[in-house]
């Protein structure tokens, strides 16, 4: 049954509705048919979600690897490269990282961390929107990526701002634990924004959470943004059709992420919900503030 679904899926996923694949004269027809096409896609997502007709994690990892390394300018926008697509608006690009730095300061005060981190790891650093804001706070800023181009872009942006403390770590999407061989703990801050919803499955996300726990020093802080699941079926993890569905590939029930973090050695301190994010027009985001266990309070 799954094979049949994958076959139908690959037919309806033919890129006729994507911007670059139709000549201009066909655009009005495309606009007329778009709502019906959307209904078909919704029906597929509903059926797959309710009957568990998911693609294998290995397939999704392979597709993610291909997607984030495609020589396509839209991937640069999705990877938050400065000057690309909606980030041609410099203020928007700067605001993205600046907002995360503000959150970090707020959360550090909440959990009683007053020292600046020596080493920061960002999982999925993209084009460096966070890096250019956080790099001045640490001696070393480590970016983990599945895209060599994004790592180079992040390094370029940091150099342009005068930072020389960047360490790039390239991994393959199929093997996130590879990073552990290249990272030497301890780190004091693990940061990941707009990435946990793009990983192939929730189980994969929890593998990355385990990696965070392994690389953090006792008392270290993790700030991890995920997309949360509500009681609407639309917020179920997609787990199929990576290219079409990457922004909602993986979602997490808030209580599940919280307890999984505890199981992996964190003390969850707080969660902030952002049902609507005006900077990217998306939503259902939760920022988890986690502290690695076995520490003494600083105050
Ligand atoms: C939406 S961008 C976010 C960039 C940055 N974190 C920010 O908030 O501006 C997502 C980035 O995650 C990277 N990525 C996707 N899957 C990944 C994975 N499994 N492990 C590490 N990075 C990944 C992509 O290559 C892309 O650069």
Image: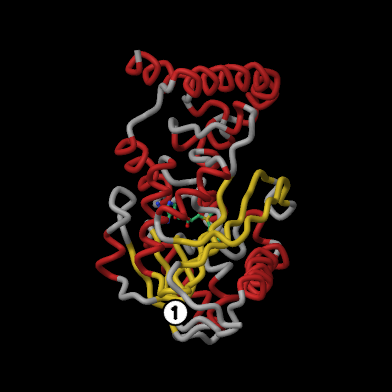
Q: Residue at x 55, y 63 (%)?
A: 223
Give the secondary structure at mark 1: strand
Q: Is mark 1 within 8 Å of ligand 1?
A: no
Q: Position of residue 174 (x, y in %)?
A: 30, 48
- The image quarter containing residue 269 is bottom right
Q: Residue at x 68, y 71 (%)?
A: 106
Residue 231 is left or right of residue 68, and the answer is: right
Instruction: For the C terminus, give its image quadrant.
Output: bottom right
Q: Position of residue 166 (x, y in %)?
A: 43, 79
Residue 58 is left or right of residue 265, and the answer is: left
Q: Residues within 10 Å of mark 1 (few under 14, many from 20)?
A: many
Q: Residue at x 43, y 22 (%)?
A: 52
Residue 255, above or below 244: below
Residue topped by disc 1: 119
- The image quarter containing residue 26 is top right
Residue 222 is left or right of residue 91, and the answer is: left
Residue 136, above or below 237: below
Residue 13, above or below 121: above
Instruction: For the N terminus, give its image quadrant.
Output: top left
> 20 and 123: which one is in front?
123
Residue 54, above or below 267: above
> 78 and 180: which one is in front?
180
Q: Residue furthest left?
A: 181
Q: Position of residue 200 (x, y in %)?
A: 41, 41
Q: Position of residue 141 (x, y in %)?
A: 45, 77
């Amino acid at each position: 049954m799954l094979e049949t679904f994958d076959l139908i899926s690959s037919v309806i996923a033919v890129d006729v509705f994507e911007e670059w694949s139709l000549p201009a004269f066909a655009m009005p027809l495309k606009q007329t048919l778009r709502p019906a096409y959307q209904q078909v896609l919704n029906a597929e997502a509903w059926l797959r979600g309710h009957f568990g007709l998911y693609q294998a994690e290995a397939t999704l990892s392979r597709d993610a690897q291909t997607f984030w390394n495609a020589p396509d300018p839209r991937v640069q926008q999705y990877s938050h490269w400065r000057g690309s697509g909606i980030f041609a608006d410099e203020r928007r690009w700067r605001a993205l990282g600046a907002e995360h730095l503000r959150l970090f300061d707020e959360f550090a005060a909440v959990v009683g961390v007053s020292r600046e981190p020596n080493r920061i790891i960002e999982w999925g650093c993209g084009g460096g929107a966070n890096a250019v804001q956080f790099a001045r706070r640490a001696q070393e800023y480590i970016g983990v990526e599945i895209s060599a181009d994004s790592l180079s872009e992040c390094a370029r942006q940091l150099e342009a701002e005068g930072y020389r403390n960047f360490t790039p770590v390239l991994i393959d999407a199929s093997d996130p634990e590879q990073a552990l061989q290249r990272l030497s703990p301890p780190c004091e801050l693990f940061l990941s924004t707009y990435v946990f919803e793009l990983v192939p499955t929730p189980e994969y996300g929890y593998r990355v959470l385990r990696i965070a726990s392994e690389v953090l020093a006792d008392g270290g802080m993790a700030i991890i943004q995920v997309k949360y699941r509500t009681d609407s079926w639309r917020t179920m993890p997609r787990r199929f059709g990576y290219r079409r569905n990457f922004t909602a590939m993986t979602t997490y029930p808030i209580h599940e992420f919280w307890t999984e973090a505890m199981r992996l050695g964190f003390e969850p301190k707080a969660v902030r919900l952002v049902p609507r994010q005006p900077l990217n027009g998306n939503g259902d985001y939760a920022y988890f503030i986690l502290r690695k266990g076995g520490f003494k309070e600083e105050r």
